[in-house]
Structures are given as structure tokens and as C-alpha cells.
Image (spheres, grey):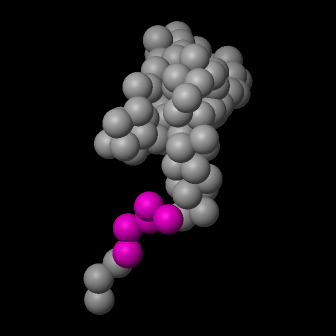
Amino acid sequence: MIEVYRGSDYFVGQLLKGLMEQEGLQVHLNGVALQGGLGEVPALGHLSITVNDADRERAEEIVAAYERGDFALQDED
């Protein structure tokens, strides 16, 4: 398993995990249990996503596409 994402936002982590799973990747979102125990402690980067080594390239492409805004919803006028 190799880490392809590190962050602090639980919702982003879940979103990326879901996007990767839709592509058939086996994904682990680590650090979720720490979310509720942090309280007022400023903790950054406690969430990480790991995938199988063979899936690294595709997972990194998904993260990059998310960061570019490729998955953003468009407002309908």
C-alpha cells in the first residue's frame, strides 16, 4: 500500500475515496478515528489515503483532477 493523499478534511477524504472506488481501486482512508478525538488540538494532515502500489498512478490522477476542479458541480441557470 502506498499513500497518495494526506489532508485534514474528512469530507474531502471521503469524496476522494469514493471517486477512487468508482474506478475499481482498493482504497483505505486512514486516520478517521482521530477526527472526533482531536477536540481543539490543531492537527493537520491526520487523514491519509492509501492504495495498492499498482494503482498509484491512477489514484494520483484522480487527486490531481479533484484539485484542478474537474469534479466540481456546475450551477444551472
Any part of residue 64 in sight: yes
Q: Specify whether 54 is left or right of 44.
A: left
Any part of residue 11 in sight: no
**Foreground pick, 18 / 39:** 18
Q: Is residue 66 above or below residue 10?
A: below
Q: Residue at x 32, y 42 (%)?
A: 22
* Magenta segment, prevailing SS (helix, strand or loop): loop
Q: Quadrant of the N terminus?
A: top right
Q: Is residue 65 above or below residue 50?
A: below
Q: Position of residue 11 (x, y in %)?
A: 44, 38
Q: Residue at x 35, y 78 (%)?
A: 75
Q: Quadrant of the C terminus?
A: bottom left
Q: Residue at x 59, y 24 (%)?
A: 53
Q: Specify whether 43 is left or right of 68.
A: right
Q: How many marks?
A: 0
Q: Is residue 46 above or below residue 76?
A: above
Q: Position of residue 7 (x, y in %)?
A: 63, 33
Q: Position of residue 65 (x, y in %)?
A: 55, 57
Q: Specify whether 27 is left or right of 42.
A: left
**Residue farthest toward the bottom in the current orientation of the protein:** 77
Q: Specify whether 51 is left or right of 44.
A: left
Instruction: Determine the image quadrant of residue 43.
Output: top right
Q: Residue at x 42, y 39 (%)?
A: 20
* Segment tinted magenta in the rendering: 70-74
Q: Is residue 66 magenta?
A: no
Q: Is residue 72 magenta?
A: yes
